[in-house]
Amino acid sequence: MTAVHTGSCLCGAVRYEVRGLLRDSIACHCSQCRKTSGHYWSATQAKTADLHLLEGRGLRWFRSSGIAQRGFCQHCGSSLFWRPDGADTTSIGSGTLDGPSGLKTMCHIYVADKGNYVDIAPAVAQWPQGRPG
């Protein structure tokens, strides 16, 4: 049976469901993720075809780099999605999921850019830049 996960922005103007598998979360400390979230951004990932909007009136996309766009709510400002150009996957802010997700943090990336106030448990994999492979 296919798992179904739901989530939303803070105000509910963007609600979604994922009908399929979610990857464990990756915590990204790059400067763009820090600026868009106010901290590091923890995201799961799903096939874009498995991500379905239940309410999309607030969703807007921002071209944040030459390789990707970020989806956010224009009403409450919640950061929701990160979508790389040409990929068949969309990253989903782990904190936007409803209820227990069963996800774990699998690694931290771009830790060379992390805020000086962040301490990362040594048991979790860390990469100075992006994740290899």
Image: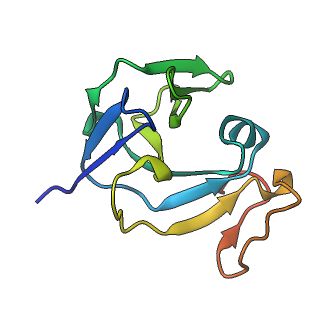
Locate residue 105: give its quadrant: bottom right
Is residue 46 or residue 52 the one in the foreground?
52
Asked if residue 53 lies left or right of residue 126, the reply is left
Percent of width and height locating residue 37: 66, 41
Indicate the colouring scheme: rainbow
Percent of width and height locating residue 123: 66, 82
Is residue 57 or residue 109 the one in the foreground?
57
Rendered view: 28 above or below 57: below
State the count of labels: 0
Asked if residue 129 lies left or right of residue 48, the reply is right
Rendered view: 51 above or below 133: above
Residue 43 visible? The answer is yes
Q: Residue at x 57, y 57 (%)?
A: 26
Is residue 100 or residue 124 the one in the foreground?
100
Asked if residue 7 lies left or right of residue 54, the reply is right
| Quadrant housing the C terminus | bottom right
Q: Residue at x 50, y 27 (%)?
A: 71
- Judged from this view, the residue extending furthest toward the left is 1
Percent of width and height locating residue 11: 42, 33
Q: Residue at x 29, y 55 (%)?
A: 21
| Quadrant housing the N terminus | bottom left
Residue 133 visible? The answer is no
Percent of width and height locating residue 99: 33, 59
Rendered view: 65 above or below 101: above
- Judged from this view, the residue extending furthest toward the right is 116
Locate residue 65: give its quadrant: top right
